[in-house]
Image (cartoon, rainbow, N blue to C red):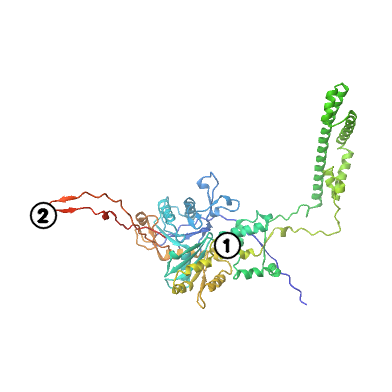
Amino acid sequence: MATQQQPVCQIFSFRDCKNSPDPILDPLVTSCGTATPIVIDNGSFQTRADWATVDLDAPRLLFRSVAARSRGAARNETQIGNDIPNLEPLRWLLKSQFDRNVVVNFEIQELIFDYVFTHLGITSEGRVEHPIVLTEAPCNPLHCRQMMSELLFECYGVPHVSYGVDALYSFHHTNNQKNLRPPQTGIILSSGYHCSHILPVLNGRLDAVNSKRVNVAGGQAAAYLQRLLQLKYPGHLAAITLGRMEELLHEHSYTAVDYQEELEKWRSPEFYEREVHRMQLPFSGKLPGGCVSVEERQERRAQQLRRLQESNARRRGEKLHQDQERLDRLMGVQELLEDGFLDQFHKSLVELNMDSAEELQSYISKLQLAVEQGRQKLLHSDGVEGKTEVSELEQQMEEGDGIVMMYPDFSEDTLTEKPNLNVVQPAFNMAEYHQLFVGTERLRCPEILFQPSLTGEDQMGMMETLQYVLARYTPEQQEALVSNMFLTGGNMQYPGMKERVERELLAIRPFQSHFKVNLATQPTLGAWLGARDWALEHPPGCGGRGVAGWISRQDYEEKGGEYLSEHCASNVFFPIKINKTLPARQAEPSVTLPTEASGPVRMVTSSPTSSSLTSDVPMVSS
């Protein structure tokens, strides 16, 4: 009969990768002499930057979008990205330029730009003579774009800037790889570190009016996983760091196609033992008192005995000093009786809580005997008596009765029975104690994308938001949108994410309707690759304006920092009409105009309605 195979335990170790400083790259110039564009994917989790060249499959400059500077430190002492070897000790010092997915801290953003331009090898003094392609948030606020343009044009003196949405860049890059002819129609589900987006695309352009944001993404999932494991393992709070939780999410989590059904599977012990991931925490394998040599054990025993001797000698000396002081006081009271001071003697007896001189004499005799014995013990502590004491201490410690020597007043009757040495005690497994059993947490944390209520968020999940967005279109437009549903972003890389979206979409859509879900070929790098492709296909002009998608210095000065030149992957530029009301003028007095001939006189009066003028002021909104 075949024996039943035991499930194999899956034990993993945290990599705890240390960052290494980025090298300084060489600047590039095209053969025609024009400056090569710089493509920067300004992500809230990671910044990716490099030159816009065809021979690159991935950007060479990737680092976390954080800066660390101690209070009072100089600006040049700030550590950026990969200059920080380990983020965990400096977690309380880390600052980002983002508030959710919108850039608000432009001091940190300037430090990020300095880091990028320095490591790309730009050595021009005071200027960056290269066009910049920069990603921004969907429906980026006007003030944020204005501050970004002001930083790039005024501080760095760049010749051209182009803004685009990272999810749209990834969308067009994947469609170009599949040889789909533009303009494309589809709907994008993008999930990053701080938030997720539902972005409908009609005829190759973003429909900003119907775009929606969900404030749940990878950062909330990592914090939720950290909270779950810290509640589960309160003894390892310091070891359950946010960086390790991000590693757990990226490498060990998955999305359940049917969440409730998957949780039921985890109730089975066999399924649990087979699927649970045991994460091994670092620990010291040397146990106290175990796996040590005989010499070390004897040395430790001798140290313990010496400490016990010193403690007992100190305790005897203190007790002898107290007894001697009390004896001197009682002898002083007895002298009052001998000298005939009876009133003072009786008052002292009351203070000592004694009734007669005989009781006083008895107590003096006992104290004299105790003081004499204490002196004898102190005098012979280094002699034969001390050696006998050491042997007694050693014997007591071997028998487990060292507490009697530590506390002489402790009653031996209260000691418990000695353990049976013949019973084999189970060995303590230090390695297993330092293991994190990650079971249902592997699917509970990615589930917050679909059920934000798990973390206490009072908002809709991604699929509910998608259903709300689709309901705002006609049935024909809905068919066109769901026929090209696109998943992108670092938080969409969980195994089973595509299948889960298909299952949810099947429940949303009408019976026998068709849809197609596509996952980006490179969810994290697709935005940079798409921006690189766009920069190569649409190079900026030589000065002036007229190139779609690029904002020149002249455009910035004439139209303001919030101006946006639209292209296929950008936000939408909305000129807003504002009714500007001029202050009403006072009615002018009537004027009589005489004519050449004596005829009727005409009266000219200013019309009060002419004081309200309407002017169209072009504004920018995205």
Residue depicted at x 58% and y 70%: 496
Q: CA distance from mark 1 to mark 2?
A: 86 Å
Which residue in the structure is indicated by mark 1? Answer: 453
Q: Please name the amino acid that badge 1 sits on.
A: Ser
Mark 1 vs mark 2, foreground winner is: 2
Of residues 448 and 308, which is closer to you in this image? 448
Above or below: residue 309 compared with residue 525: above
Considering the image in quadrants, where does the N terminus appear?
bottom right
Image quadrant assignment for residue 184 = bottom left
The answer to whether residue 453 is seen in the rendering is yes
Which one is earlier in the sequence, the residue at label 1 or at label 2?
Answer: 1
Above or below: residue 303 compared with residue 501: above
Considering the image in quadrants, where does the C terminus appear?
bottom left
Residue depicted at x 26% and y 54%: 608
Label placed on residue 426: none
Secondary structure found at label 1: helix
Which residue in the structure is indicated by mark 2? Answer: 599
Q: Residue 477 at x, y = what percent?
A: 44, 72
Q: Please name the amino acid that badge 2 sits on.
A: Gly
What crowding class fits label 2: few (fewer than 14 Cα within 10 Å), some (14-19), or many (20 or more)?
A: few
Q: Which residue sits furthest left? A: 597
Above or below: residue 252 compared with residue 104: below
Of residues 339 and 26, which is closer to you in this image? 339
Of residues 550 and 464, which is closer to you in this image? 464
Secondary structure found at label 2: loop
What crowding class fits label 1: few (fewer than 14 Cα within 10 Å), some (14-19), or many (20 or more)?
A: some
The answer to whether residue 36 is seen in the rendering is no
Above or below: residue 431 compared with residue 92: below
